[in-house]
Amino acid sequence: MSRTQTAGAKPSSVSRALARDRLGVPAVLFFVLAGVAPLTVAAGVIPTAYATTGLTGIPAAFLVIAVILALFATGYVAMTRHITNAGAFYAFVSRGLGRAVGVAAALVALLSYSFLQVGLYGAFGPSAASEAAAHLHLHAPWWVWALAAWAVITVLGLLRVDITGRVLGVLLTAEILVIVAETAAGLAHPSGGRLSLATLSPAGLTSAGFGTFGVLAVVAVLGFVGFEQAPVLAEEARSPRRTIPVATYFALGVVAIVYAGAGWAMAAHTGQAHVVAAASREGPGLLFGLGGSLLSQSAQVLFLTSLFAAALAFHNCVWRYMFALGREGVLPAALGRTGGNNIPKAASLTQSLTGLAVITAYAIGGWPPMTDLFFWLGTTGGFGILILLALTAFAVIAFFARDARGENTWRRLTAPALAAVLLSGIVVLAVAHYSTLLGVRPGAVAAWALPASYAAVAVIGLAWGLVLKARRPQVYATIGLGPHAVTGQLTPASRETPA
Amino acid sequence: MPGLSGTGLVADDLYLMAHHEITGKPYLQPRALGLGLAGGLLAELMLEGSISLQHDGVVVAGRTLPGDGLARHVLGLVAAEHERRPARDWLLFVARNAAGDVARRLERSGYVIRASGRGPWRAGRWVPVDADSAFAPLLRGRSALDATRALSVNGAALAGLATACGLGYRLAEYAPPRTGRSLEETVAQLGPALRELIAQTQAAVDGALLSHRV
């Protein structure tokens, strides 16, 4: 045992200085919740989900999915302690299920986060347009505002890589307070004067057949996307055993309560029988209408900042994947290069170009942005994350099956196995009922093309992984290591924390 | 007085390369700069034979005491630590103050001077005294990538560390067009300890970038 770890011994000055620079639970939690963007989900996803799916079990789905994700997180955070580059799903999959499957997972992740990122422009555009029309008397189409947000994100992506933590922290706190206030106001004035618990009941999850659960689960998973980001900061965390798990579980708990509460309040305030029609009519206004006008006004402004922050967070997430894969040699090396101020320009610009192409296509096509861009691509992004969660749960089991590494049976087998079965079941149900999820007729192109896009990139990834194995074994050997590809280090360097 | 040949110290050259030769504005984010310079300071000690890198961490080789005060200070830190620590820990630890430490060393050698910031709210900055001397390290890094020139250990370490901390794009701008020697070939000429130090610097900088803490 090292000198500084010995009981009673004082940690050395080097240990103390390094520990001071590391992040505690609050910093990690803020980072995670900034990606979750609570108001985007409460005002954007939940009303659109009510309207598009016509299902009212959404609040209950958030609670059930939180439990399933907590099961998943048990093995996930345990494995985080034993691998490097723990901030990326494909690192888990590479170490658990093999590097070729890892490349497939990497491409699925890239597509998922990209869908999530560009989808947000579909909510930002119309919301900013209606705010500007109402208050500034500026009448511009949604895509002008979407392009404005795109331009700011593109410039920010080329100027700096750190998310300005303090600004996001303030906005995030305000977002949560506004949702809680709207929720309280909505619950204080229930429809018919009686508060109904029906939408929180698990019975509502299968109201229109068992497949309903798959649809609701994808919406709920979409709400939680971002909770998986805590391991991005694993190497920066003060205590690898404590900081990441605590921040992850705390984020899950906060998000579950806030979303279930907001969804419940919307249904209770308008009446369960009317919430779907009201959501179709009012959109995000379903949440904003719960409280007074001042609250509603601040909520609408914060909704825009929340959408913007989420789009920026996912933009960063996409370039992070591209950069790591470029560094490893899995994607073109140019994506792994940095320019002035350490900005990964090529990776950042690639995602910006994707955003520009999608906004332009929707503007020219005249497709409705809130449903066809925000909700369709957003839920499809959430569905991609669901696939990755299921795959990662299997990877955790396989990883610890080779070596338990001191983890107990619950963490390395029981919880991940339960999560793997449940998440895989949801994936199957979601595929079978994708048309309900999107609110289109069965057999519509979007209902099969969007989920099939993951199968396509997975096959390409698998094939590319096998090509790398045969042709460039030195690249293949470092798949999943991210920044450690240059050192070949598989496990995190040992760390200590002062008492 | 500043000269085109520089101080002969890797971290000094890296510092000048990482800043504009006239304005002194940095080309790197603060943490990446610190990590690169920490790599430079540790590389100086390795080149002097004062420390070595073993599988379980950095150890004092104890053969020579460096002539430079800052190098002696860093060596003192390593020597004072009873526990053997991995290179990454030392990179992170030394990086905390490396930029200021190296700038002050360059100030003592006459390469930079401290200019006060414009306005009380703006921090001061170290500005090169002579633009040509400040630009010369980039040419030294460039010549390390030129196959027609003899390769020095200092030059190879400089090119490797510069690329590791994010200055690769600057070297590429001035790279010799046809007579290029790849960075991999250049770094391959170094001993295993320096190669590992460069790789660890690169991993630490990339890690900082991926966690958005540069």
Image (cartoon, rainbow, N blue to C red):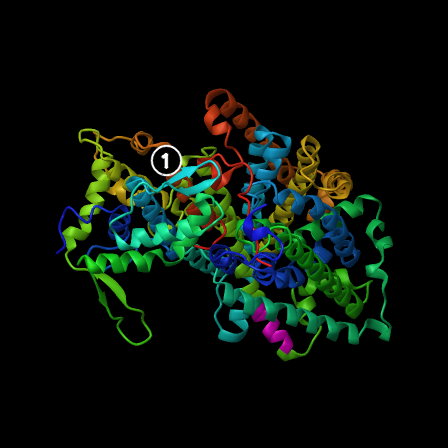
Quadrant assignment, res A445: top right
- Residue A48 in sight in this render: no
Quadrant assignment, res A210: top right
Q: Position of residue A269 (x, y in %)?
A: 78, 70
Residue displayed at 52% across by 33% down: A479
- Report the side of A162 relative to B131 (left or right): right
User: What secondary structure characterizes most of the magenta part?
Assistant: helix
Question: Does the magenta segment cover residue A298?
Answer: yes
Residue under label 1, please give it.
Answer: B195
- Report the side of A88 relative to A272 (left or right): left
**Residue sitting farthest toward the top:** A470
Q: Which residues are magenta?
A: A295-302
- Residue A338 in sight in this render: yes
- Report the side of A453 relative to B174 (left or right): right
Residue displayed at 55% across by 52% down: A4
Question: Does the magenta segment cover residue B102?
Answer: no
- Residue in front for this viewpoint, A322 or A414: A414
Residue displayed at 82% across by 62% down: A273
Tag 1, which secondary structure? helix
